[in-house]
Image: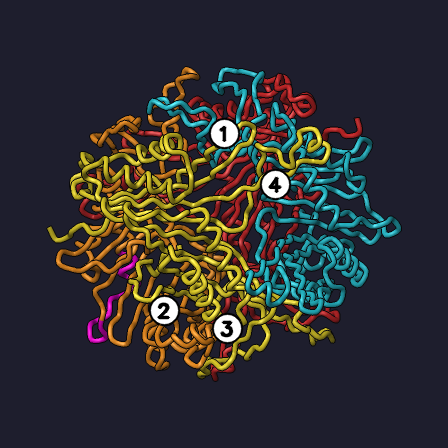
Chain colours: A yellow, B cyan, C red, D orange
């Protein structure tokens, strides 16, 4: 046979599960998009079409919904750990499970004054508005022995309206860019960070608190860095996370430089004193890098933050 | 000539303008997407290609950026009023101008504790994170005499996890739906509301405050209505706005019923007590209606909220 | 009551139906996205939440699938006519039905030479590849007496690499654009055309042939017009349709001017002889107009092609 | 220093370049979206913000446009090779360049009969319509010594309306799926294939012919395989390519199983004899695998086809 089968995986992608937890009149919501990918002894199904080792993707979907009831959804990461463990330990041909989860955040809707007096609460306890802003993501991989948990976020758009420069760069025959001593720096953050929790014997991180803290540190490092290049800002964001959060060993960013060009208003007799900008779509600079705790091996794939 | 020219308009669409206002170290940001559509004596350009009456769309783009400097951007509506007036009054062949604006909201990034002590502020005054959530929209039309201002929003996703029923409906031979006495009600609000300010002699509304109040009333009406149908909720949202805001005479909604189906867990020996839902994409119910102050004529087009 | 209900409609949107017709081994496919919007006596459901007049949107979905079996799908327009007639004639409270349909075209996959000899055919008769290119659309409205059928297409991207100029336009203080005597003209056509078939007594158009011919005439008019403005090209496209197709009385276009800017290569010592262009995203010119058969009243809404 | 820098790269993404080649009145078009990613001695810019080793992303953009003039665009792959070689050989700190390109295909617009007689041609030689269908992609990586060229496509949607079964699979406590003996098999192909050309000394493949042939073989294998699982079909598609094209050593697919569910029409007294289907959006099965020429090492990343 002149061809052979390489890496392969299968499962049900984008299972949209919403879990409502009722604490009396106060409801809580978890809103996830769960994708399952399984791999193992799958030669036969590729070569002959025999499904004898194949747990249907439909079954993996059912399992997501059943587990939302059986285990609840404490956090996306914890939920993914339940799922990954189940597939690997319950099906002999399955050697590895990868669970990817997107999470959408919701806020409570505030009560109107009249109603507030009536019900004695500041919020309607079963009413929510989608927060928008970033999408939280996580990936849990289990091979029957070790865990790899990577969390992250995407579509978090940030901007500094000053404290950014760009000069002193290489100039070749195709260089026309003018040096900038006060520019807007804006990007749409895609980030992934890997936990050093790999083993059931270790104490598990507090996934919810960790996420909240990482996001806070990332935003603050972006805001507080006087930037000579987006690369420098990226490194500050990553090292702030590594230095502040002992549960994390590696961070990778994909940061598009969302260019805001100062509009030339001179033809109209106007001076543009860093006030009016054109927000461009394409092309955009794209800066990507991994920051690691000294001594650890990188494991986040190069293309992952670009998904 | 067997064919004639009907309604026509032209202009530059989606001019992305970001305006930074500097109040010492404290920066303020307005982030707009401005679309210009002009109409008037445009027979010639269609029939013969003569551009003698055509102000280039490129010029309308330049005007957007120049006006951001000349007038600032107090609000999207006020900015659109400056632009519309300019095109109609400065160009004899232009009889009507329609300015459509999308606005993206930003929040300040909080300072880290260490930095906060250092700079004595809770926020980095030039650092922002995009709020996400809804997109604010507005449309300003001017014909040289009267104004029509319609504001609105889109992509505001809301959910009630209880206090929604649906029963007592018509049943024909194609009806299989089971009646529901406790369901999730979720929608992605697209709304437009029309101001009764039409004339430069009238006192102009406070556009920023009006938007904030309309959004608040809409959310509260959604949350506080015990719903027997999405139509009923829609009507409550609209009438709450009309009754609370005297500057507004008409509201139109396009509300997709974002179905959350209770998952059948019985095959797995589990009881789903309104806990686990599948969030479906397509198809979706789509409920659209106009609510008017009694006595006024409707002017918001049927298709407008569906854009 | 200080507020009243205006125009309203409801139904199930985006019902994705695929119909396979089997003619022996040769299969045929129709792939539609059908949206139903009904209106009539709907005061009660908005004011009190009574669903006594409400045929559920779920039922309208079921009807789409049942009708695909009962009537087949000869064309999107014919299918929409069956549906609209059914809702208006079978439900007393429903006074008007609007059916919107998107259609995706498929082509057959060619057989490999070896297989071709074996099965004696050039194509695998049950294998298809999505054609891509434009999306065909139609809207059928029925009020119990008269029909309004509007067909159209969107996302048809076309380009002339020469035979386009733009000069002789108005110049005001904000004008910086240079005149162009040989430019690229490119647009993404969104078009809607209205049939003069309004009555069951009239002979019905051949919807499939009409669509094919309108698309052909539109493309040819675009290609064969030496253009002094996109407005002129638009008018030629519309009048070519009206003049060639007697079943059509009105056409409306929304044509974004997809700018292709000649790149300045002089800083690199190179001459750009209309060879290398930057294809821009935003902003873009947007040209919209209706062309009518002389003597008829316009009925296609201004915003419709912009959907 | 407790943190270190890992893999990093930067460049300008999504440079949209359109190249017109004029052969008398006959024009040819190449329409690309080019992304540049460079890596090398970039410690300083991350750690201190020194840009002394940084060729600006703006310069990489300029180079794309200048090279379109200097070298023309024979094929996306050949164009990427010119660019990658330039960056690595002209800038000492740059050790590796990765060029990613999307290509959009265009067809000529046919002439109207009248015009055809006049100009004596079947097509307007400067008029084009975007073909739609798939997007062609390629990635060229150069490290100063060796080349890695991966080509591919995405968004090619295919369907078999019969000759697909799915049964004999594992059944666990969460399995409810019914076995299927005649189902629709549809997918949206994302594929990447790697060339064994790695060295300037080797004869370079004919990139244009190779692409056309690979697409043809892939479509035919999809159509001609009687499928017992999507995995089996995937493997047939991959091995057909490897066996037919000696220039290719490795193929990877990401195939979403675009579910078409047979609609239950029994409640309406109708029999659905494999005629009427609901085309679902989410969730979907997702099947991914690599097929290799026996003896070669896999190099296409697992996540690459999922981009």
Q: Residue A125 appears in which quarter of the rendering?
A: top right
Q: Which mark is residue C274?
A: 3
Q: Which residues are magenta?
A: D199-213
- SS at mark 3 in the image: loop
In which quadrant will I find the C terminus of chain C? top right
Q: CB under 8 Å between callouts 1 and 4? A: no
Q: In the current view of this chain or complex, which residue is farthest to the right?
A: B201
- SS at mark 2 in the image: strand
Q: CA distance from mark 2 to mark 4?
A: 50 Å
Residue marked by disc 1 = C79
Discs 2, 3: same chain = no
Measuring from the top left, give residue C104's x and y in whole percent.
44, 41
Discs 2, 4: same chain = no
Q: Residue at x 56, y 77 (%)?
A: A180
Measuring from the top left, give residue A210's x and y in whole percent.
44, 51
Q: Chain of mark 1?
A: C
Residue marked by disc 2 = D4
Q: C303 or D212, which lies in front? A: C303
Q: Earlier in the sequence, mark 3 or mark 1?
A: 1
- SS at mark 4 in the image: helix
Measuring from the top left, give residue A285's x and y in whole percent.
47, 67
Residue marked by disc 4 = B306
Discs 4, 3: same chain = no
Residue A82 horizontal side relative to residue A17, left or right? left
Q: Nearer the viewer, mark 2 or mark 1?
A: 2
Q: Nearer the viewer, mark 4 or mark 3?
A: 4
Q: Residue A46 appears in which quarter of the rendering?
A: top left
Q: CA distance from mark 4 to mark 3?
A: 40 Å
Q: A307 or D85, which lies in front? A: A307
Say few, some or many: other residues with alpha carbon within 10 Å of mark 3 (under 14 / 14 to 19 / 20 or more).
Answer: some
Residue A93 horizontal side relative to residue C251, left or right? left
């Amino acid at each position: 046979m002149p061809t052979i089968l390489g890496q392969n995986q299968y499962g049900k992608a984008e299972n949209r599960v919403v879990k409502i937890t009722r604490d009396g009149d106060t409801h809580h919501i978890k809103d996830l998009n769960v994708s399952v990918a399984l791999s193992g002894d799958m030669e036969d199904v590729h070569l002959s079409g025999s499904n004898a080792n194949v747990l249907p993707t439909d079954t993996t979907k059912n399992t997501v919904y059943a587990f939302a009831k059986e285990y609840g959804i404490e956090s996306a990461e914890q939920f993914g750990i339940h799922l990954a463990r189940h597939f690997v330990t319950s099906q002999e041909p399955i050697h590895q499970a990868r669970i990817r989860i997107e999470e959408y955040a919701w806020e409570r809707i505030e009560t109107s004054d009249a109603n507030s007096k009536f019900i004695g609460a500041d919020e309607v306890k079963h009413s929510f508005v989608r927060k928008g802003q970033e999408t939280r993501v996580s990936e849990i991989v289990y091979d029957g022995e070790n865990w790899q948990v990577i969390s992250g976020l995407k579509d978090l758009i940030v901007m500094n309206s000053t404290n950014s420069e760009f000069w002193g760069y290489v100039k070749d025959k195709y260089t026309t860019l003018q040096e900038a001593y006060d520019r807007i720096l804006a990007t749409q953050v895609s980030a992934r960070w890997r936990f050093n929790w790999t083993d059931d014997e270790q104490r598990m991180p507090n996934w919810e608190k960790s996420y909240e803290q990482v996001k806070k540190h990332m935003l603050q490092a972006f805001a507080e860095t006087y930037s000579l290049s987006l690369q420098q800002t990226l490194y500050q964001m990553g090292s702030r996370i590594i230095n502040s959060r002992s549960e994390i060993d590696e961070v990778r960013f994909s940061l598009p430089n969302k260019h805001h060009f100062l509009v030339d208003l001179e033809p109209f007799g106007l001076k543009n004193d860093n006030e009016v900008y054109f927000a461009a779509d394409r092309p955009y600079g794209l800066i990507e890098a991994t920051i690691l705790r000294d001594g650890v091996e990188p494991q986040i794939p190069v293309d992952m933050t670009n998904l």
